[in-house]
Image (spheres, rainbow, N blue to C red):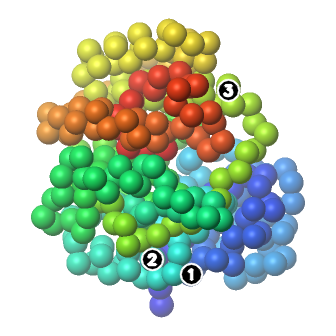
Amino acid sequence: MSSVTVVVATRNRCQQLMRLLPRHAAPVIVVDNGSDDSTPEMVQSYFPHVRLIRLAENVGVAARNIGVAAAETPYVAFADDDSYWEGDALRSAAHLFAAHPRAALLTGRVLVGRRGHLDTVSAEMAAAPIGTAADLPGPSVLGFLACAAAVRRDAFLAVGGFEAKLHMYGEEALLAMDLASRGWGLAYVPSLVVRHFPQATGRDPGARRRRQVRNDLLTTWTRRPVGVGARAALRCLGSREGRGGLRDALAELAWVRRHRRPVAPRIEAALRILASTPALSVASVPDALPPAAQRPPSPLDGQQQR
């Protein structure tokens, strides 16, 4: 019996999902985020062994929380509808969790596209900019790519999972900080391989960048020093999307005040080290967006996230 469940949150990407569902090497829970195409019906028809949870509306990243809560295994691996964990990666992840009880999250090596080129974020994580803890199976990280993360279910649920307020884009950083603040370890393990096949979605890239800026600001303002948050806000003034994201974040100040819990000095120190790692500073850019030089500066520049 598998000790890992794969949770796939999806919305209106039926074709990609149908192609990759057979690739998963563990039980799968598909959480359909209010799709209005044929996704739920196709999953039920062609993959009756897959557990399907149909949501009436698009709740964004909170769909993953619903999938984790429904899982009955001690470990959960996330996949997008355009990704899967290769080979025996999930079995290996379960063994690593068992052997390293402080590990709450393991993130794997991401190979992109048919040619399988190494994701830049994976390459930078391998350089171990914040070191490697003796009780973790790989370099310590303070962020991850959601499609390449496996979690200890109890730890994930204890910190509340992904923040629903963020809805989508850049949600990983806040979860990483909250796990680390509880004393859990997060590690990059290159032997765990994830294949990722991102495709342009036709969605408005400007709106996506604006949402990214908003979410990065909310994360910064709730977890980092006031000065860092102020400088992050100023960096947003140089572009239309940045200014829009700033306005959206300012509208959530009441929420920020209720949820503000600054990280410990040791975590802040690690975040400052990561600020000097260029590739990790753009890891939060959603798939199919322009490169860093063409996007507004992220308030979380320097954090490992997507």
Corner quadrant of residue 48: bottom right
Question: Mark number for residue 89?
Answer: 2
Q: Are marks 2 and 1 in contact (CB under 8 Å)?
A: yes
Q: Earlier in the sequence, mark 2 or mark 1?
A: 1
Q: Secondary structure at mark 3?
A: helix
Q: Earlier in the sequence, mark 3 or mark 1?
A: 1
Side of 96 relative to 133 (left or right): right
Side of 271 relative to 235 (left or right): left
Question: Mark number for residue 285?
Answer: none
Q: Earlier in the sequence, mark 3 or mark 2?
A: 2
Rendered location of residue 273, percent (x, y): 22, 36
Q: Amino acid at mark 1?
A: Ala
Tag 1 residue: 25
195 or 154, nearer to the observer = 195
Q: Amino acid at mark 2?
A: Ala
> Is there any visible trace of residue 263 in the rendered image?
no
The residue most toward the bottom is 1
Q: CA distance from mark 2 to mark 1?
A: 9 Å
Tag 3 residue: 207
Rendered location of residue 40, percent (x, y): 79, 63
Residue under the image location 26 percent in, 15 percent down: 227
Corner quadrant of residue 155: bottom left
Side of 186 relative to 18 (left or right): left
Residue under the image location 14 percent in, 39 percent down: 266
- Tell me the crowding category of disc 3: few under 14, some 14 to 19, or many 20 or more residues within 10 angstroms, Cα based: few
Residue under the image location 37 percent in, 67 percent down: 190
Q: Secondary structure at mark 1?
A: loop
Q: Amino acid at mark 3?
A: Ala
